[in-house]
Image: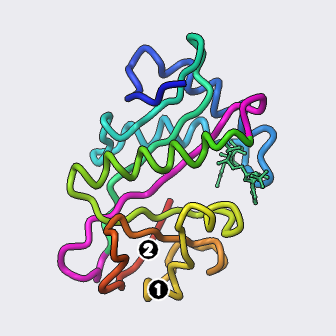
Amino acid sequence: MTIRKAAQEDHPSIYHLVWTAFATARVSDGTEQDFVLELRRRDTYRPDLELVAEENGQLIGHILLTPLPVPGAPEGLRGLMAAPLCVRLEDRNRGLGGQLLHEGGRRAAELGYNALFLVGDPEYYGRYGFRNAVSLGFQNASGVPDPFLLARSLNPDGFQEAGGMLNLH
Ligand SMILES: CC(C)(COP(=O)(O)OP(=O)(O)OC[C@H]1O[C@@H](n2cnc3c(N)ncnc32)[C@H](O)[C@@H]1OP(=O)(O)O)[C@@H](O)C(=O)NCCC(=O)NCCS
């Protein structure tokens, strides 16, 4: 299994992967594959932070990290929204979701980003270092219950200062 940058030629396979993976998600609105298309159209889209996991010529996982403005955040906060994340049904529970989060975070830190934010299940993301964003000091403008708004610092010593409005969409 390798994790690499997504190429333009991968886009149709990614659409299919995201669509089928979210069809078996615990929570889905059925539009995550179109959300990927929308994120790619944004000015903030960074192709170097769209990653795929590949094995035997098949795409089996995907993550997209998109720069996220955080109004009112402490000077120096450079955040990314991590969404969506998915792994093909047949390849779950092998740690691939964790590896995509880890590799995305590693590449993001190399590029100067220092925080990841997402809306997701705290039980799952908690195992990969994500914490309740509101408890850390961020404000929730994302229209989801506080427990699902999560943050992870990419600094080894965590958030020194946290704050600002998180509007993930
Ligand atoms: C969520 C997802 C990316 C996890 O991928 P994965 O490669 O199987 O994850 P990992 O191998 O890193 O972790 C698997 C573990 O997390 C657990 N887990 C998976 N989803 C979970 C959830 N929503 N809540 C709590 N635990 C969860 C699994 O039961 C497994 O537990 P175990 O190690 O004790 O057996 C994958 O299930 C998926 O693509 N789901 C559909 C899309 C989706 O829901 N994406 C997340 C949107 S926020």
Quarter of image, res 158 = bottom left
Of discs 1 and 2, which sits in the foreground? 1
Taking the image as shown, residue 53 lies to the left or right of residue 70, namely: right
x and y percent of residue 112 in the render? 21, 57
Quarter of image, res 47 = top left
Q: How far, Cα to Cα, is label 1 from label 2?
A: 12 Å
* Residue at 47% in and 18% down: 10
Q: Is residue 164 above or below residue 87?
A: below
Taking the image as shown, residue 124 lies to the left or right of residue 64, namely: right
Question: In terms of depth relative to the viewer, which is nearer, 40 or 100?
Answer: 100
Q: Specify the amino acid type for callout 1.
A: Leu
x and y percent of residue 143 in the render? 59, 73
Pointer 2 local density, CA inside 10 Å: few below 14, some 14–19, many at least 20: many
Which residues fall within the magenta stretch?
Answer: 71-92
Question: Magenta segment: does it hold 46?
Answer: no
Question: In terms of depth relative to the viewer, which is nearer, 54 or 13?
Answer: 54
* Residue at 56% in and 61% down: 128
On residue 136, the disc is 1
Secondary structure found at label 1: helix
x and y percent of residue 55 in the render? 58, 19
Question: In terms of depth relative to the viewer, which is nearer, 73 or 158?
Answer: 158
From the image, tell me which residue sits under label 2. Answer: 166
Question: Reading the chain from its start, which is encountered first: label 1 or label 2?
Answer: 1
* Residue at 61% in and 39% down: 96
